[in-house]
Image (cartoon, rainbow, N blue to C red):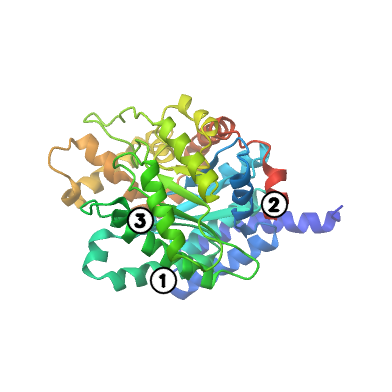
Amino acid sequence: MEPIRERRKKMDERKTLDQEVYQAVFAEGEEKASRLRAVREKSEALGARPASIYPLYREMAREFPGFTVPAINLRGMTYDVARALFRTAKRLSVGAVILEIARSEMGYTRQRPLEYAAVVLAAAAREEFPGPVFIQGDHFQANRKAFLAHPEAEKRALKDLIREALSAGFYNIDIDASTLVDLSKETLEEQQRPNYELTAELATYVRSLEPEGITVNLGGEIGEIGGHNSTPEELRAFMEGFNRAFSAGPGLSKISVQTGSSHGGVVLPDGSVAKVQIDFETLRVLSEIARREYGLAGAVQHGASTLPEEYFHVFPEVGCAEIHLATGFQNLIFDHPALPEEFRQKIYRYLKENLRKEWQEGWTESQFLYKTRKKAFGIFKRDWWDLPQGVKGPILETLEETFEKIFRALRVTETLERVQTLCG
C-alpha cells in the first residue's frame, strides 16, 4: 500500500501537469523541446510508460482473442481528448487501445512526435491510467511523386521521421509504401516489388534503432486505402517478397488492406458522408491468411470511423486485428452543438479565404469545408486549447460516450490485465 504522503504528492504532481503541458506545447524552439521532454519524464515517473503492443500481437497471431484493437488518431484538443479516452479506458478496463498520428497529420495539426508523445503520456498520467501506453506512427507513408523524383531524399525523410518517432516513444510504427505499387507491371510480384522492398528497408532501419528490451511493433500495407479491394494474391505477393528482402529480426506483425473504405469517408455535395459498404468477407479471408500462412496478428482496417455504429461489432467477428479511427471524432467535435457557431464560422471563413487553391472543380462549399477543416486543428491550435470548459465539457462527454460504444463493440473491455501481463 502506497503511503498517504506519497499518494498526495503524486496527486499534486498530476494536477500541475495541466499547466506544464500547455506551456510546453506553446513554447518555441529549444525551450519547447526541453519542456516537452520534462513533461514526458514526469509522466513516466508517474506511471505512464510508452510500450510496444508486439507481445499481444504475437499471441494474437497464434490464436485470435476475439477482439479488435482500436487505433485512434488525435488531431485536435489532444490533451483533453486523450484524457477523455483514458478515463473511459480505465473505467472499462481497456488495455488494448492505441493512440496514433500519421505523417500527414503531424504536418497539418502541428504535432511533431515528441509533442504528441509527451501530451498523450501526460494525459495518461493525469488520469492514472494503469496500463502501458501504446503510441503509434500511423501511415509513415512514402510520397509517390517525391519518391519517383528523388527516391533517396524521400527515403531519408522517412528514416529521419522514424528516428524522431522512436526517440519520442513511438514503439509501434506502420510503414506505408503502398503508394509505390506499380499496377503497370504484368505480375503481382512486380507490382508489389517497390512496396515490399522499401517496407523491408525501413523495417530494417527500425530494428537497427529500437531501444534495448523493446521490439517495435511493425505494420505494412498492400493497397492504398481508397483503391480497389485487396486480394489474397496481392497479400501473398507482398509478404513473400518482404520475407525474402527482410532479415533483420522479427518482421511485420500486421498488414493493412483495402476493403471498400476511404480515409475521411466519401462526402456528398450537401456535406453528409455517404454510407460505405465494407467487404467483411475480404477482411475475414485476408486476416485468416495473414495468421495461418505468415504468422501475423491479422489484417488492419483503415478509414472506419465514419461507418455506422452497427458495423463495429462485426470486426472482431471476422478476425480483424486492428481498426483505425480518426475522422469520425473530428466530425463529432466540429459538428457538436456545444461548439460556438461564431468559432466554427471563424474557421470556415479562414479556410475559404486562405485555402481556396484546394477547392477542387465540382466541389460544393460543404464538400470543400469537410475536406479542409481538419487543417484548422493546426492553424487554430491555441484557440482549440483555450476553449472554455463550458464548451469543452459537453464535447468531451459525448466523446467518452462514443469511445465506450466503440470499445464495447470491438470487445476490448476487460483486456487491461491481459495487456499488462504481456506488455508490461
Where residue 2 appears, as percent x and y from the top left, is: 84, 55
Q: Is residue 25 above or below residue 233?
A: below
Sequence-wise first label, 2 or 1: 1
Q: Nearer the viewer, mark 2 or mark 3?
A: 2
Do we see residue 190 in this rendering? yes
Query: Residue 370: which quarter of the image?
Result: top left
Total numbered circles: 3
Q: Amino acid at mark 2?
A: Leu
- Which residue is at a point 39% across and 53% down the rendered structure image? 238
Q: Nearer the viewer, mark 2 or mark 1?
A: 2
Sequence-wise first label, 3 or 1: 3
Q: Is residue 154 left or right of 139 when viewed as pictured?
A: left
According to the image, label 2 marks what residue?
422
Q: Is residue 286 above or below residue 119?
A: above
Q: Are marks 2 and 1 in contact (CB under 8 Å)?
A: no
Q: Is residue 399 above or below residue 193?
A: above
**Nearer to me, 286 or 349:** 286
Instruction: Please identify the quadrant where the C terminus is shown.
Output: bottom right
Q: Amino acid at mark 1?
A: Asp
**Nearer to me, 56 or 131:** 56
Tell me how far mark 2 sits from mark 1, CA to CA: 30 Å
**Nearer to me, 420 or 260:** 260
Where residue 223 appears, as percent x and y from the top left, is: 34, 47
According to the image, label 1 marks what residue?
160
- Which residue is at a point 16% across and 51% down the rendered structure image? 357
Extreme residue toward the bottom, this view:
30
According to the image, label 3 marks what residue?
104
Query: Residue 213: which quarter of the image?
Result: bottom right
Where residue 420 appears, as percent x and y from the top left, is: 71, 50
Q: Nearer the viewer, mark 3 or mark 1?
A: 1
- Which residue is at a point 24% across and 47% down the rendered structure image? 351
Tell me how far mark 2 sits from mark 3, CA to CA: 31 Å
